[in-house]
Image: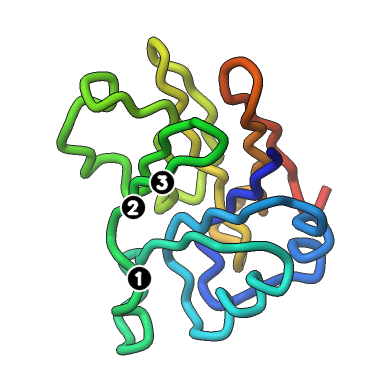
Amino acid sequence: MRVGVISDTHGLLRPETLRALAGVDHILHGGDIGREEIVPELERIAPVTAIRGNVDRAPWAARFPETVDIVLEGARIHMRHDRKTLDFDPIARGIDVVISGHSHKPLIERQGNVLYLNPGAAGPRRFKLPITLAFLHLGEGAPRVDSLDLLD
C-alpha cells in the first residue's frame, strides 16, 4: 500500500502536490489544512484521514480531530500535528508510525520499532524550508518512507 503523507498545506494545494499524489491508495494529512476545500480536493485522489492543526480554527475544521489512530495494511499509525505534544510511549501502545507536522521540517526517524514521520510542509514556503511531502509504504516488512521535494 502506498500512502501519501502531507501536512501544513495552509490552504494551498499546489498542482505539483496533486500530481505527486496521483495513484496513492490513501492520503494522511497532518494538520494545518487551512481551507475547507483542501480535504475534498484530496478525496478526489484517494480516501483521506486528516487531523486539525493549530491554524485550523474555523468552524469547518471542528469535524477533524486533533489526534487519530488508524490501522492501514496492519500498520498502527498515530497522527498528531505537533510531535512535541506526544504524551504517551508509542512502543507501549503498539504504534508503528507516528505522523506529525507543525515544524514544516521534513523528518524521517526511527526509534526502536517506531517510525516518526514529518512530511514537511506542502503549502506556502516558510523561511527557506523546502516544499515537501512523503510516501509511506506499508505491507510486507517494516513501514518505509520516501520523501519528495515538490519544487526540486
Using residue 61 as the reference point, say whether residue 110 is left or right of it. right
**Could you say whether the residue bearing mark 1 is in a helix, strand or loop?**
loop
Determine the CA span between mark 3 and mark 1. Answer: 14 Å
Determine the CA span between mark 3 and mark 2. Answer: 6 Å
- Name the residue beneath numbered marker 1: 64
Q: Badges 2 and 1: C-beta atoms under 8 Å apart?
A: no
Foreground tag (3 vs 2):
3
Image mark for residue 68: 2
As shown in the figure, which amino acid type bears the numbered disc 2?
A: Val
Furthest-left residue in this view: 87
Image mark for residue 70: 3
The x, y position of residue 106, in whole percent, is 55, 39
As shown in the figure, which amino acid type bears the numbered disc 3?
A: Ile
Name the residue nearer the viewer: 125 or 20: 20
Q: In this view, does 4 lie above or below 1?
A: below
Ranked by sequence position, the earlier of labels 3 and 1 is 1
Q: Badges 3 and 2: C-beta atoms under 8 Å apart?
A: yes
On-image quarter of the N terminus: top right
**Could you say whether the residue bearing mark 2 is in a helix, strand or loop?**
strand
As shown in the figure, which amino acid type bears the numbered disc 1?
A: Phe
